Amino acid sequence: MSTKLFDLTGKNALVTGGTHGIGMALATGLAEAGATIIVNDMFPEKLESAKEEYAKFGIDIHTYVLNVTDEEAVESTIPVIEEEVGPIEILVNNAGIIKRIPILEMKADEFRQVLDVNLTGQFIMAKAVAKGMIARGHGKIINMCSMMSELGRSTVSAYAASKGGLKMLTRNMATEWARHNIQINGIGPGYIATAQTEPLRVDGHPFNDFIIQRTPAGRWGEPEDLAGTAVFLASKASDFVNGHIVYVDGGILATIGKPANEK
């Protein structure tokens, strides 16, 4: 099989939330496959810092100040990006937040904020970018889902609700837009070693031990573990893959787990 199937040379990829962590790893993987990278954020200083970080890897990114939940701003900015950089052929809907609050203690406004960023923001971005993709007759949209698209966990009700909703939104986008030669799929990361999870990954920490035991691969994932899946879903190799969520989780969803005393 030719590696040209995975070649993204000449393609423009917009990665929301691509200033750090998983988003940056995804964008770096796409860039290494040849794509031109566009990153947005609400804060100019984060974009400047990210631009410097990408430059360390020889990647020159295009940056735009943009809040994914602001429909009017998104609708007006996407045409500017396409005029200044080129057609957006790949959208990675990665921007998201989490609030760890028990249901009985969570205010409705806090619940709505998580859904607004993680679900409504993805809807707004995809809708704005899909217009150009439909006109051109091709495109790739990758929605960042989660194991919480399938499983519940204490204190993350809003996050799980948003990611479960995003799974179904992905399938509905595929239902409506596949006939335009647009592939819309999702990636569901397992537990990934990021700055956010660093305090939990100390040897002997109960949650660290739980995740390592719960994951058949026996380790936390690295952000880079997600890059290959992103390249596949962004490339010609996935032209007949639509409406799927690919879980990159080291096997967690494949198993009920094992007893604590089982080696």
Image (cartoon, rainbow, N blue to C red):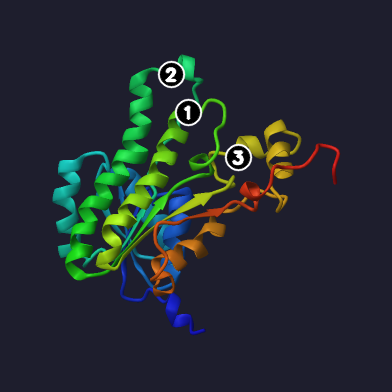
Residue drawn at x 37%, y 39% is 118
- Distance from Cα at disc 1 to Cα at disc 2: 9 Å
The residue singled out by tag 2 in the image is 106
Query: Amino acid type of disc 1?
Result: Ser
- Where residue 155 sits in the image (x, y, percent)? 53, 25
**Does any portion of residue 121 appear in the rendered image?**
yes
The residue singled out by tag 3 in the image is 198
The residue singled out by tag 1 in the image is 157
Residue nearer the viewer, 202 or 88: 88
SS of the residue under disc 2:
loop
Residue drawn at x 52%, y 58% is 226
Residue nearer the viewer, 135 or 244: 244
Give the class, few, some or many, for how many residues have Cα within 10 Å of label 3's Cα (few <14, many ≥20): few
Name of the residue lying farthest toward the bottom: 2
Q: Earlier in the sequence, mark 1 or mark 2?
A: 2
Query: Amino acid type of disc 3?
Result: Glu
Q: Is residue 85 left or right of residue 243?
A: left
- Where residue 112 sits in the image (x, y, percent)? 33, 27
Residue nearer the viewer, 48 or 65: 65
Residue nearer the viewer, 174 or 157: 174
> Residue 191: which numbered mark, if any?
none
Callout 1 touching callout 2 (CB < 8 Å): yes
* In the rendered image, the vertical position of residue 63 relative to residue 136, given as above or below: above
SS of the residue under disc 3:
helix
Give the class, few, some or many, for how many residues have Cα within 10 Å of label 1's Cα (few <14, many ≥20): many
Name the mark nearer the viewer: 1 or 3.
1
Query: Amino acid type of disc 2?
Result: Met
Residue drawn at x 43%, y 18% is 106
Name of the residue lying farthest toward the top: 104
Q: Earlier in the sequence, mark 2 or mark 3?
A: 2
